[in-house]
Structure formats: structure tokens, C-alpha cells
Image: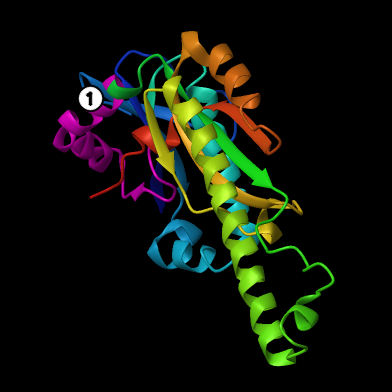
Amino acid sequence: MSLVWVYAVQEAGAGEAPDMSGVDGERPRVVGTEELAAVVGTVADDGFDEAGLAAAMEDLGRIEMLVRAHHGVVAATAQDRTVAPVRLATVFRDDDAVTAMLRQRHDEFRAALDRVRGRREWGVKVYVDGTAAPPPAPDAGAASTGDRPGTAYLLRRRADRDRGAEAREDARAVAERVAGTAAACAVDVRRFAPQDARLSGRTQEMVLNATFLVDREREDEFRDTVSRSGDGAVVEVTGPWPPFSFAAAEES
């Protein structure tokens, strides 16, 4: 038996599926209606049914392989046409079920395609050296408070909290300044929780993690302007990518 994995939706007649391997090593193809088409792949029932995919979600190695393959097909398809990416692990029993879904959700997909036409997604991350309070300077507080150790300790703690709050406020200000600069060159934005340093691979703290939908004719302006907006912080601009964050249509 086999199932049908869906990668993305495009307009009918937009083009054939890319000549490459999909998530199960299959060759992607196109299934469509009169107005919409889905880029799909035939995958094995074993491993891609509900139980198989649930097991895959527990296997980080397999998840990574599926994500890379899925996004690879979407990115290749999006090189020469407008696509609405479909979320990972959207699977149907056969082609007829795919076309029925396209008919049922016609308006939703048309709106998604119109929203991202002529636009691509760019990622922006901002890193600072850390928002923890710096070590306190050698303290003369004991002398200034009549050599009372308890009072001096409390004063040091309060000073540390003040320095920490100031550092966090400075980091927020940097993040908002970069986000504002990016938003001025974009048509939409999605913000996400900053990644832990163990995931980002950096020693600095991430204070902004966002993606922006940018008109193709403004991409050079976006990249150059945002890259220079950090004012001492590290600004990482990545892309362009298919509009995963802005056109992804999820199975209902």
C-alpha cells in the first residue's frame, strides 16, 4: 500500500514538480484541479501512516531527514513560481483525497497564494553579549555604612539587580530597533521565542528571532539595511526562503 505526502500548493499550470527525491526517496509529481495543484509524492504506507509518523516524531534523526527533504522539495518548487507550503507530515490516502482537499479549501489556498505572490521570507536573528549583570566592582559599601556587613550585602544585591535590569532593557531596545528597521522594509512579520544558546551554537544571547515577508524588489534593501542596524549587536540575516511562515496551510 502507499500514501500521498503533500509538499505545497500552487496554481494549476504553474509547472511540473522538481526533478529530485522526496521524503521517501520518491520523485515528486503534481496532482490538481482546474485552478489549483498540489506537489505531492507517493510514499510507503509503512512508516508514513499515523503510527509511523508518530514514531518518527520521537526520533530526532528521522525528523531532521524529513524536514530537510520536505523543505528541499518546497524550495526547489518555489524557485520559479508562487507556492503555499503545506506543513510537514500532511498525508492523504490517495490522489482523489488530495484533489478533494484542494476543492474544499480552494478559497484558503487562493488567498495564501495571493498574499505571498512576488514575495519571499527572510530570517533575522539578533545576538548580544549577555544580559546577566556584570560582576560587582570591589565594594566599599561596608565602610560607607559603618562596617555593617548585612547592609553592605543588601546594597550590593540591589546594585546587581539594577545592572541586570538595565542590561535586559538595553537588549530589548536593540531587538526592537532591528525589528522596526526590518519591518519598514517588509510587508509582514512573524516573531518567535529566542532560541537557547545550546541550539543557536553561539555564546551570545539571542534577543530577536523573527521572519519577514519581503517583496522581491526590496530584498537587497532589506538585507543591507537590516545587517547594518545592530549598533554593536550581532545581526544575522538569512534567506531568501519560500514563505513557510506566511503561506503554510495546515490540514484541517
Q: Quadrant of residue 166?
A: bottom right
Q: Position of 114 compared to 166: left or right?
A: left
Magenta-colored span: 85-114
Which is more toward the observer, 55 or 116?
116
* Main SS category, magenta section: helix
Q: Secondary structure at mark 1?
A: helix
Image quadrant where residue 133 sits? bottom right
* Left or right placement of residue 74 versus residue 162 in this view: left
Three-letter code, disc 1: Arg
Q: Residue at x 59, y 48 (%)?
A: 171
| Residue 13 x %, y % | 33, 13
Q: Which residue occupies the foreground of this view, 1 or 7?
A: 7
Residue farthest to the right? 138
Q: Residue at x 61, y 52 (%)?
A: 64
Where is mark 1, residue-wise? Answer: 110
Q: Is residue 25 above or below residue 184?
A: below
Q: What percent of the width, then of the height, locates residue 222?
A: 54, 19
Residue 88 counted in the magenta span: yes
Would you say residue 115 sits in the magenta stretch? Answer: no
How is the model colour-coded? Answer: rainbow
Q: Is residue 239 above or below residue 71?
A: above
Q: Quadrant of residue 98?
A: top left
Would you say residue 27 is visible in this rendering?
no
- Residue drawn at (58%, 25%), measured in percent from left and top? 226
**Residue in view at x 63 percent, y 59 percent:** 196
Residue 69 visible in rendering: yes
Pick the front one: 66 or 151? 151
Q: Quadrant of the N terminus?
A: bottom left
In the rendering, at what x and y percent does residue 178 appear? 54, 33
Location of residue 95 in the rendering, given as x and y in whole percent from the top left corner: 30, 38
